[in-house]
Image (cartoon, grey):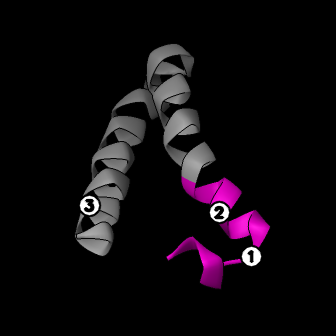
Amino acid sequence: MFEELNIIQVIGIFITPILLVLVGLFGPKSLRSTSWGMLVFVLTTYLIKFL
């Protein structure tokens, strides 16, 4: 699956959830709930795509 993506896309796939967790834990209060919601959406999308 990863062979058809360029290196920037592959790095983004792994970095995006990490950044969302960091913002959810340490970010401004106004962004925390949004960050957790986005993380759920991203992980659900990855689960559907990889299965």
Magenta part of the protein: which range? 1-13
Q: Which mark is residue 10?
A: 2
Q: Are marks 1 and 3 in contact (CB under 8 Å)?
A: no
Question: Label 3 is placed on what type of residue?
Answer: Leu
Number of other residues with Cα within 10 Å of mark 2, as a class: few under 14, some 14 to 19, many 20 or more: few
Name the residue rendered at 62%, 85% in the picture. Answer: 4
- Rendered image quadrant of residue 34: top left
Name the residue rendered at 25%, 58% in the picture. Answer: 44
Q: Please give left or right for residue 25 compared with residue 8 in the image.
A: left
Q: Check disc 3 and report the residue beneath it.
A: 47
Relative to 33, residue 43 above or below? below
Number of other residues with Cα within 10 Å of mark 1, as a class: few under 14, some 14 to 19, many 20 or more: few
For this rendering, which residue is in front, 44 or 27?
44
Q: Which mark is residue 43?
A: none
Q: CA distance from mark 2 to mark 3?
A: 15 Å
x, y percentage for residue 14?
57, 48
Q: Are marks 2 and 1 in contact (CB under 8 Å)?
A: yes
x, y percentage for residue 32?
42, 28
For this rendering, which residue is in front, 1 or 23?
1
Q: CA distance from mark 2 to mark 1?
A: 7 Å
Name the residue rendered at 62%, 44% in the picture. Answer: 15
Question: Label 2 is placed on what type of residue?
Answer: Val
Q: Quadrant of the C terminus?
A: bottom left
Q: Earlier in the sequence, mark 1 or mark 3?
A: 1
Q: Check disc 1 and report the residue beneath it.
A: 6
Element assignment for label 3: helix
Q: Please give left or right for residue 47 compared with residue 23 in the image.
A: left
